[in-house]
């Protein structure tokens, strides 16, 4: 038994280490400001970060990505909350078809979806910009958020709503005082997923942002061409952004759990 | 308000959005794929010329690459995810939660950043791995960067978490007493795996495998960042039709073929799985 635990510990450590090695590599690479990558660095410096922060472009890239992610989060959570209730709360004819149809976009190659959306926008005469990227991200992210909120709903007891109604609550009060508070944790984690998935998305953005550029797009174009330490620095800054947000989200969920206990 | 009326009302916004944002674009691509080569207008003159070209004009290798890469990656990911999921399930408690969160983390770091990190790690000469080995042990090593192996490692690295999480859900569906009973009746480890564990965990495994397969079919960043010029994947080939070649109908026809491959794999598998059972827990 103990040897089993040892092997498990070792295996899991290796898996986690391998998953983080590339991310650590970017951090290590960003800590020198030399033209060519020569590790171990002779001169460690944070010059690449000051370069990144003084470039006007860094701010624009972050703002574009942030704008898109924020819109995607808001719209997805609103629509997905409704969709999740149809998915898991009510029993209606056609529900099983709806359940399968909603998850289809998740099982669809993203670059292909991005291209199809680009043709669609062109065909209806909409020129691509960050707004069309919001729409594109939602096609892939809305189904995921719907699933996350639906998972929460499967543990829901509809009798609570009947009880509230028997006690004289209006339909609106039932929704506000009973249903939504119960769904809240699902909506928070759904929103967190929506933001982070949009923030880091590359394949959909590549085709649908038009003249605007998101962080992952810029990084991809720079990475695929030639190396520069400033690219590593921007990558680290962007990743720190999602790390902070992820931790805040986890913190909120922990607080709620602690408040209830 | 009856359940069925509430259901229809609530599903309407999502259904409408996906009808416009998912179904319509695919229909438009299908229409473009039936236009004369190198036209940019949608007309009612339909032709199958692009599909004929697709099958006769050397588009085989990109398809072969993407589908083959997707199959191999899916199998490799499943083989790593199964023991990992079982260990995490057995570990339970706080430790398992922390490790699960750690494994989920990289999903939210952009693919471009992670693959860039991988290329920095694998870079020959002054890369993180080669440079450290040289500085510490004085050995020089080669690299898998810009080879097919590099692309394959990148695919496995990026998609592993997508297999692991559904597999974890699947493993959670195996009741321990069922396994114990089989053992008491004299089943060996292999029999327990084949007769009890795999069939019970199947919904999770299928979802994970589907997700990975589909994501890999579309994957092109791995080949661009880690593969140098060694591999042309199918989405890259399609992109070239749209950009350099300015042949939208041809690109659309190739896109429809990828959609067809995806549909052939996804529909039968999805039809057999009860999503309710998997996520209700």
Image (tube, coloured by chain):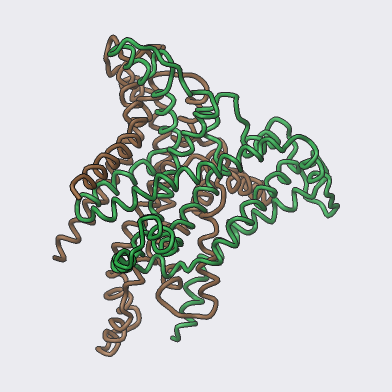
Chain colours: A brown, B green
Q: Residue at x 52, y 73 (%)?
A: A96
Q: Quadrant of the C terminus of chain B?
A: bottom left
| Image location (x, y in percent) of residue A228 | 42, 18
Q: Nearer the viewer, residue A125 or A245?
A: A245
Q: Please say if B221 is above or below A126.
A: above
Query: Height in image: B68 above or below B34?
Result: above
Q: Is residue B89 above or below residue A226?
A: below
Left or right: B40 with respect to B225? right
Residue in view at x 44 percent, y 39 percent: B158
The mark total stands at 0
Image-quadrant location for residue B129: top left
Along the line of sight, the residue nearer the viewer: A102 or B270: B270
Across and down, in percent, residue A148 comes to: 38, 61
For the question of whether residue B127 can be seen, the reply is yes
What residue sits 42% from the left and 23% below the top? B122
In the image, taking residue A140 as reference, residue A245 lies left or right, namely: left
């Amino acid at each position: 038994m103990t040897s089993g635990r040892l092997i498990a510990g070792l295996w899991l450590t290796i898996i986690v280490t391998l998953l983080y090695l590339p991310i650590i590599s970017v951090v290590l690479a960003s800590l020198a400001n030399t033209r060519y990558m020569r590790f171990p660095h002779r001169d460690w410096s944070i010059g690449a970060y000051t370069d990144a922060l003084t470039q006007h472009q860094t701010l624009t890239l972050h703002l574009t990505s942030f704008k898109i992610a924020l819109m995607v989060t808001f719209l997805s959570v609103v629509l997905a909350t409704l969709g999740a209730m149809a998915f898991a709360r009510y029993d209606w004819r056609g529900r099983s078809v709806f359940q399968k149809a909603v998850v289809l976009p998740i099982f669809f190659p993203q670059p292909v979806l991005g291209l199809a959306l680009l043709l669609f926008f062109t065909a209806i005469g909409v020129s691509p910009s960050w707004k069309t990227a919001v729409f594109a991200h939602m096609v892939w992210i809305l189904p995921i958020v719907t699933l996350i909120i639906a998972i929460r709903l499967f543990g829901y007891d509809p009798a609570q709503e009947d009880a509230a109604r028997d006690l004289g609550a209006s339909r609106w009060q039932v929704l506000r005082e009973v249903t939504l508070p119960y769904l809240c944790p699902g909506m928070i984690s759904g929103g967190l997923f929506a933001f982070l998935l949009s923030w880091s998305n590359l394949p959909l953005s590549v085709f649908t942002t038009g003249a605007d550029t998101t962080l992952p797009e810029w990084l991809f174009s720079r990475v695929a061409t030639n190396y520069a330490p400033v690219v590593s620095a921007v990558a680290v800054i962007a990743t720190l952004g999602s790390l902070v947000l992820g931790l805040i989200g986890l913190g909120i969920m922990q607080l709620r759990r602690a408040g209830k206990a | 308000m009856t359940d069925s009326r509430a259901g229809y009302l609530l599903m309407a916004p999502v259904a409408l959005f996906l009808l416009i944002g998912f179904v319509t674009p695919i229909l438009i691509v299908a229409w473009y794929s039936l236009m004369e080569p190198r036209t940019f207008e949608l007309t009612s003159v339909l032709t199958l010329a692009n599909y004929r070209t697709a099958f006769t004009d050397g588009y085989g290798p990109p398809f072969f690459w993407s589908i083959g890469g997707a199959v191999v990656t899916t199998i490799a990911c499943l083989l790593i995810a199964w023991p990992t999921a079982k260990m995490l399930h057995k570990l339970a408690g706080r430790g398992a939660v922390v490790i699960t969160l750690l494994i989920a983390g990289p999903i939210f770091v952009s693919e471009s950043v992670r693959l860039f990190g991988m290329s920095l790690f694998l870079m020959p000469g002054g890369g993180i791995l080669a440079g450290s080995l040289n500085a510490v042990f004085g050995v020089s090593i080669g690299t898998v960067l810009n080879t097919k192996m590099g692309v394959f490692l990148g695919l496995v690295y990026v998609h592993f978490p997508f297999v692991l999480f559904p597999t974890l859900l699947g493993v959670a569906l195996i009741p321990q007493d069922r396994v114990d009973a089989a053992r008491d009746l004299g089943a060996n480890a292999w029999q327990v795996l084949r007769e009890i564990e795999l069939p019970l965990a199947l919904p999770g495994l299928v979802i994970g495998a589907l997700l990975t397969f589909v994501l890999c079919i579309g994957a092109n960043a791995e080949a661009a960042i880690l593969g140098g010029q060694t591999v042309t994947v199918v989405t890259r080939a399609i992109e070239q039709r749209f950009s350099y070649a300015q042949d939208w109908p041809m690109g659309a026809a190739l896109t429809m073929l990828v959609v067809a491959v995806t549909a052939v794999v996804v529909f039968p598998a999805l039809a057999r799985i009860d999503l309710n059972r998997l996520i209700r827990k």
